Amino acid sequence: MSTSSKAKPSEQPLSTILPSKPTWSLEDLFEKTPQEAEPQVSTKELHHLLRLSALPLPTDEAEEQRMQKELQSQLKFVKAIQNVEIGDDVKPLQSIRDETAEGMKEQEYTPESLKGEFEKEEVVGKRGRIRRRKVAPPATDDGEKWDLLSLAPKKVGRYVLVDTAKD
């Protein structure tokens, strides 16, 4: 058995891992680049993205140009992030969450963690179908009883009177 002289990244001192000089700066992201190099967002693409995200369309040309400029800036930033060099030993994230051993253990479902949910179930019938027992909602005694009808401008008995315009 041979031992490797190379230490794990977590055991190496930071001075050997981190570069001595910065490799990039925010000013690099905001430098003016030729128009051909910048990602261009057409009006049609902007409107499509706004509809997909359920956002309102721009009300005038100035607002549309501001949105296009902002989106182009965001795309430029994403491209800069994509160009960052990372080592081969860095695994991509599956999602934004705690992927450490402790974090994964905390997120794991076990019979002990589900014990309270299992207690709400019962076996019913010949085939042993599992049904959830009906549990009364927890009582909330906040000391305040709401009388929503008191907020209505017009009411008849326990009904709200709504004025409608007749044509």
Image (cartoon, helix red, strand yellow):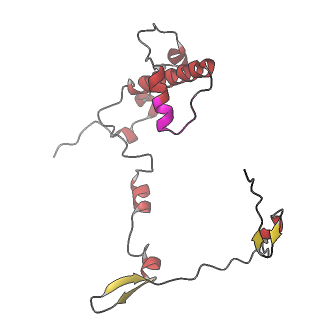
What residue is rendered at 43% in x and 22% in y?
Answer: 80
Residue at 38%, 71% in the rendered image: 110
Nearer to us in this view, 52 or 25: 52
* Percent x, y of residue 148: 77, 68
Q: Is residue 36 left or right of residue 64?
A: left
Residue 22 magenta: no
Residue 9 percent across, percent down from the top left: 36, 38
User: With respect to residue 134, does 100 lie above or below?
Assistant: above
Q: Position of residue 120 (x, y in %)?
A: 46, 82
Is residue 16 shown to the viewer in this render? yes
Q: 93 above or below 122?
A: above
Q: Nearer the viewer, residue 18 or 100?
A: 100
Residue at the top extreme, as displayed: 34
Q: Residue at x 54, y 19 (%)?
A: 69
Residue 125 image-quadrant placement: bottom left
Segment colored magenta: 48-57
Residue 124 higher or lower than 76, as above or below: below
Question: x, y (%) of residue 104?
Answer: 40, 57
Task: Let me know if residue 19 appears in the view.
Answer: no
Pick whichever, 60 or 4, lies toward us: 60
Residue that sits furthest to the front in the current view: 167
Q: Quadrant of residue 82?
A: top left
